[in-house]
Image (cartoon, rainbow, N blue to C red):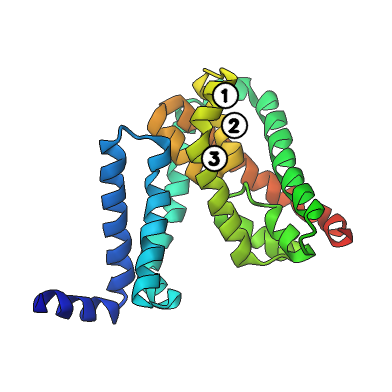
């Protein structure tokens, strides 16, 4: 017990705390996820977040102290997203044939995702900076933060909305697609990547390689389209 206390004191005072806690929580959540047959509700990202939140709350650890170590994992988000290009390269001829329909679907999906979130928030009487933070909720978190800042929103809040959107999509998509009788892995993957960005793409990759490839494509398209088009509607958000 004394050795455990000494280890805790050492880790909690160094950047190793955030890194060790994140890796331990994710490995445990991933093991349970596999044991349960990859059930959507057992998504390891969701349970890792809950475990870490409980740990930080119980121990009274400030978030900056935790992130000083967790930033090493955060850095790997960029290479991980870039790696999603490989399955797209393998299907490049097929994607060229479907370029226009895919672009139209990305525009429609991203537009509905943003407009519905902002519209519901407006009807609920949310303030303008929260509405601006909601608009890029279906774009991967780092990009959503930058877009929210351009729109007059709160970047940290935009990141929270983006993560929640990704988790909700990854957990509920299977049941929704089954209910709608959508069987095509390409369609399921593209829809999931459009609505739930990186978290959804990760889930799609676990289910089917084609679903993962189209989810990665949808993620990339949403990043580009949102970064180009959302700043153009900034005056409308200010009116709301």
Q: CA distance from mark 2 to mark 3?
A: 10 Å
- Whether tag 2 and tag 1 are in contact, CB under 8 A, the answer is yes
Q: Residue at x 56, y 42 (%)?
A: 196
Along the viewing direction, whichever of 112 and 98 lies nearer the viewer = 112
| Residue 169 badge | 3
Residue denoted by label 2: 191
Q: Left or right: 138 with respect to 128?
A: left
Q: Is residue 191 above or below residue 31?
A: above
* Residue toward you, 167 or 75: 167
Image quarter hosting the N terminus: bottom left
Crowding at dot 3, Cα within 10 Å, few <14 / some 14-19 / many 20+, comes out as many
Residue placed under numbered mark 1 in the picture: 187
Q: Quadrant of residue 209?
A: top left
Percent across and percent down for residue 2 are 10, 79
**Coordinates of residue 176 in the picture (x, y in percent):** 56, 28
- Kindly state the secondary structure of the residue where label 1 is placed: helix
Q: Which percent across, then down, holds residue 85?
A: 48, 39
> Can you tell which of label 2 and label 3 is closer to the viewer?
3
Helix, strand or loop at disc 2? helix
């Amino acid at each position: 017990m004394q050795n455990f206390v000494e280890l805790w004191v050492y880790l909690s005072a160094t950047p190793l705390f955030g890194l060790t806690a994140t890796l331990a929580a994710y490995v445990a959540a991933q093991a349970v996820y596999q044991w349960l047959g990859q059930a959507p509700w057992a998504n390891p990202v969701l349970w890792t977040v809950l475990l870490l939140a409980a740990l930080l709350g119980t121990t009274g650890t400030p978030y900056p102290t935790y992130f000083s170590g967790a930033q090493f994992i955060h850095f790997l988000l960029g290479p991980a997203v870039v790696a999603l290009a490989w399955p797209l390269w393998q299907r490049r001829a097929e994607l060229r044939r479907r370029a226009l329909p895919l672009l139209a679907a990305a525009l429609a999906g991203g537009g509905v995702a943003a407009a519905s979130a902002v519209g519901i928030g407006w009807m609920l009487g949310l303030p303008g900076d929260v509405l601006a933070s909601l608009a890029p909720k279906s774009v991967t978190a780092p990009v959503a933060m930058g877009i929210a800042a351009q729109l007059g929103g709160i970047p940290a809040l935009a990141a929270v909305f983006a993560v929640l959107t990704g988790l909700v999509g990854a957990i509920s998509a299977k049941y929704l697609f089954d209910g709608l009788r959508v069987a095509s892995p390409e369609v399921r993957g593209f829809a999931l990547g459009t609505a739930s960005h990186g978290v959804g793409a990760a889930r799609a990759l676990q289910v089917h390689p084609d679903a993962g490839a189209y989810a990665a494509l949808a993620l990339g398209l949403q990043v580009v389209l949102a970064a180009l088009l959302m700043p153009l509607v900034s005056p409308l958000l200010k009116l709301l």
